[in-house]
Amino acid sequence: MTDAERLLQRFLDQELSAEERVQFIARLGRDEALRQRVIALEQLALAASRLPRLGVPAGFVDQVLARTVPVRPAASRWLADLLLAPRTLRWNLASAMAVVCLVAAAAGAIFTSVASERVTNPAGSASVGNELARPVLVRLVVVQPAANTVEVAGDFNGWDPGRTPLEQAPGGAWTVTLPLEPGRYEYMFVVDGKEWIIDPFAVEQNDDGFGSRNAVIDVRPPRGSV
Amino acid sequence: MRTDGGANDAALVHAAQRGDREAFGTLVSRYASSILNITSRMLGAAGDAEDVAQEAFVAAYRSLPGFQLGAKFSTWLYRIAVNKCHDALRARRPGTISMDVADDDGERATWEAVDEQTPHWELEQVELAWELDQAIDALPAVYRESFVLKHIEGLGYDEMSEILGVHRDTLKMRVYKARTLLCQSLAHLAGAAVRGIKV
C-alpha cells in the first residue's frame, strides 16, 4: 500500500489520532476526488453490513446432532472427580498400586516376545481389571524404535496428546497405562508430536468422519463386577 | 449481526463437555446462521456451504473435550469453520487455496452519495445485494474471508487475527483492498442501486 492508501485505511478503521483526523478531514474538504472515494468505501461497508442473512435450513440442527456421537467426559475430569471423593480415593489408590505391580511384572514377558511392530492388542490384552473399582487399567503398547516421543490422543483425554505421553521401554516399545471406565474409546498414537498413526493391530477401527480412521478400544467391566 | 453468547455460551459448552447433547444443540442453533453465512460467502455459490457448515459443527463437537472454558467459544468455532472452508477450497482446486492476490494498481472507482430515497429503493437494494454478493464471491479468497468477517460478521481485527492466524496489520490491508476491489467491481452500478456510483 502507498502512504496515501495507508492513511485512508487508518481513517476508515478509525485509527488516526485526533490531530491526524482533523488534518485528514480538512484535506477532504479540499480534495473532491478523495472525498468521493471515502464516501464510496464507507457506503460499501454499510451495504455489506445490510446484506440479507442466509436462513438456517429446516432440520439443520438435527442433521448436525445426527452426525455426532455422545461425548464422554474427559479422563482428567473423571480423575478429578475421583480424587476429590475420599471414599473412592482409598479404594482406587490401593487397588491401582496392586495392579501396577502386576502390570510391571508382566511387562518383561510381554516385551521379550516382541517380534513385530505391535506388541499388544489394546482392545483385548494388557487390560487388567480391578475387581473392586469401576475403572479398568488399560495398557497401550506400540513399537516405534526410531521415535523420540510417542503420545496417545483419544476420547479419554480430550484428544490432547500432550496429556498422555507414553514411556519408552526396552525393544523400541512405548507404553502407558490408563485407568478407563468401561466403554468404547477411539484413539490414535502421535509420534514425535506430528505424525498421527493408527494402532495397526487394533481389533476395531472407526471412520472419524474426516477421511481418516481411529483405533477403537472396547473396555469391558472386569469379570465379577456389578 | 452475529450472536454474542457471553457467559451463557460457557455454561452451554460446559454442559456439552459433560455429554449434554441438548446443550450442544442450543449452541448449534445459536451459531448456525453465522457459520452458514461464513461458509456460504467464503465458498461462493458452489453449493457445499451447508455441508461444510455441518462439518464445522461436527468437528467442534468432537473437539469439545479439549476446549478451554476460558476461551471464547464463537472465536474458536469460527476458526474451525474457516479452516473447513480452506479444506473445501483446497479440495476444489488442488495445489491452491485461492490465495491469488491481485495487485491493487488498477483504476479507482468513486461513489457518489445520494441522499434521496427513490420509489425504487427496495428493488434497488435487492439488486445491490445480488451485485454485491457476486462481487464478494469474485474476490480472491484471502480478501474475501477478511472482508466477510469484518464487514458482514462485524468482527474486530483482534478476533479476526485469532481466527485466521494472520497479523492484524495484514488483515487491515486485506480488508482495505477488498473494499477497493469491490468498489471497482460495482462501478457499473453508477447512479443506481448503491445510492449512486460514478467512476
Image (cartoon, rainbow, N blue to C red):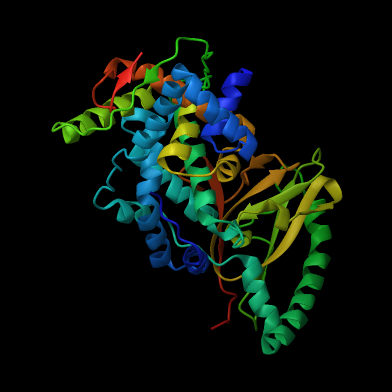
Percent coordinates x, y for residue A23 in the rendering? 59, 29
Q: Position of residue A190 (x, y in %)?
A: 69, 45
Comparing B95 with B186, the one in front is B186
Q: Does residue B140 show up? A: no
Question: Which quarter of the rendering shows the N terminus of chain A?
Answer: top right
Q: Is residue A124 above or below residue B1?
A: below
Q: Residue at x 51, y 14 (%)?
A: B102
* Above or below, A107 relative to A115: below
Q: Residue at x 64, y 42 (%)?
A: A197
* Residue B199, quarter of picture: top left
- A170 above or below A3? below
> Which picture quadrant has residue A53?
top left
> Which residue is found at the position 46% from the left and 22% from the top?
B180
Q: Is residue A25 visible?
A: yes
Q: Nearer the viewer, residue A210 or A199?
A: A210
Q: Position of residue A111 (x, y in %)?
A: 80, 53
